[in-house]
Amino acid sequence: MSTNRDTTTEEAASRVLVLNSGSSSVKYQLLDMRDRSRLATGLVERIGESSSRLVHTPQDGEPRERTGRIADHDQALKAAAEELAADGLGLDSPELVAIGHRVVHGGLKFSEPTVITDEVLKEIERLVPVAPLHNPANITGIRTAQALRPDLPQVAVFDTAFHRSMPEHAARYAIDVETADAHRIRRYGFHGTSHAYVSRRAAELLGRPVEELNLIVLHLGNGASASAVAGGKCVDTSMGLTPLEGLVMGTRSGDIDPAVTFHLKRVAGMSADEIDALLNQRSGLVGLCGDNDMREIRRRVDEGDERAALAFAVYIHRLKKYIGAYAAVLGRVDAVVFTAGVGENSAPVREAAVAGLEGFGLAVDPGRNAVRSGEPRLISPGGARVAVAVVPTDEELEIARQTFALAHN
């Protein structure tokens, strides 16, 4: 594969492949950055199992599916490349300018998208102890993509990067400084690409420069996080050292008294791994009522299910606490913005989250809130002191945008 391209080809190169490599899955999207269109999307799941599955969807085409064992990430990416090639979008195309990788943890070193070098990859590896479920899979995806296209820039876009602008007093935990520094214990935050994208799109919706705005962004999916954004920069966020801290989530507890872990060890005899599994996999909404699908929880609430009603009430209570806290941190709030699966689609969550906060200038218009749309929109009443908005997130587009910008520098 030649690494020499003429100037005309370089100028025409406009495609970015975005890879999100999980422990047993690879999500991918191929985007044309001239019009930000998706040329193809795909998912390889259950990697390493006999029931592996690849679903590939070309632009304006029907999804194609293949099943059967896909042994590892190398085979997964090669299978994805074959599907892209079948659509005339092969990874050997001169129009492919770069590959962008979602990397969950960038620690203190990475505050911007970064071209991946050997030293960058070593630093991502050094961060494995603080992101043991995510960074190893991200590294595997990077190495596999490097082997497929060694001539292309490979760019890491970090979930934590947007939150590096937090002031030290927001990022620090109140524990012994030497111990914290020795073990990299501080608040990093996550979902950064979503918070960055949504902040910018909210400013466009409001017709004002993002540099003038104070926003509270609520990324509510199975994982959930809030951020306080002043002038386009994060000044506080709800997730911390790991994605466990903060809001009530689908299976994660969010904020909890640290002494609960000591209590479970001493009284229940649980190991560190068992407590980890409890707080990350069997807590949150699923721990409270057995469901982590907000649609199902709302159905149960409407039918009078008490456990579902309690779970919903706990979820909303925590959400309101963060809205109030971030209003205090910011001093002035121009908009509260809902995004991600629950934030974009659950009118009852949005309504309940701001109910009773009229003193903060917050309210939703019932008619506007009930509208389902894939477009950014205001759901607050006309003339409201604080805008309430729904802005669909697009983390893959944000990764592609940052990757493309860096590759063309």
Image (tube, rainbow, N blue to C red):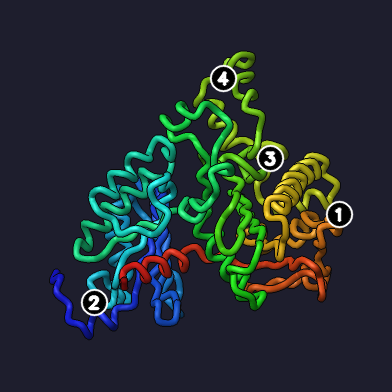
Q: Cα distance, mark 2 to mark 1?
A: 56 Å
Task: Identify the residue position indicated by label 2 in the image.
Answer: 94
> Would you say 129 lies left or right of 379 here?
left
Q: Position of residue 52 (x, y in %)?
A: 38, 51
Secondary structure of the residue carrying tag 1 is: loop
Which image quadrant for residue 92? bottom left
Q: Position of residue 284 (x, y in %)?
A: 66, 40
Q: Which three-letter amino acid code belongs to the residue tagged 3?
A: Gly
Q: Which three-letter amino acid code belongs to the residue tagged 2?
A: Pro
Which image quadrant for residue 250? top right
Secondary structure of the residue carrying tag 3 is: loop
Q: Residue at x 47, y 66 (%)?
A: 398
**Badge number at residue 270:** 4
Q: Which three-letter amino acid code belongs to the residue tagged 1?
A: Gly
Vertical arrangement, residue 336 with respect to residue 312, above or below: below
Task: Identify the residue position indicated by label 3 in the image.
Answer: 290
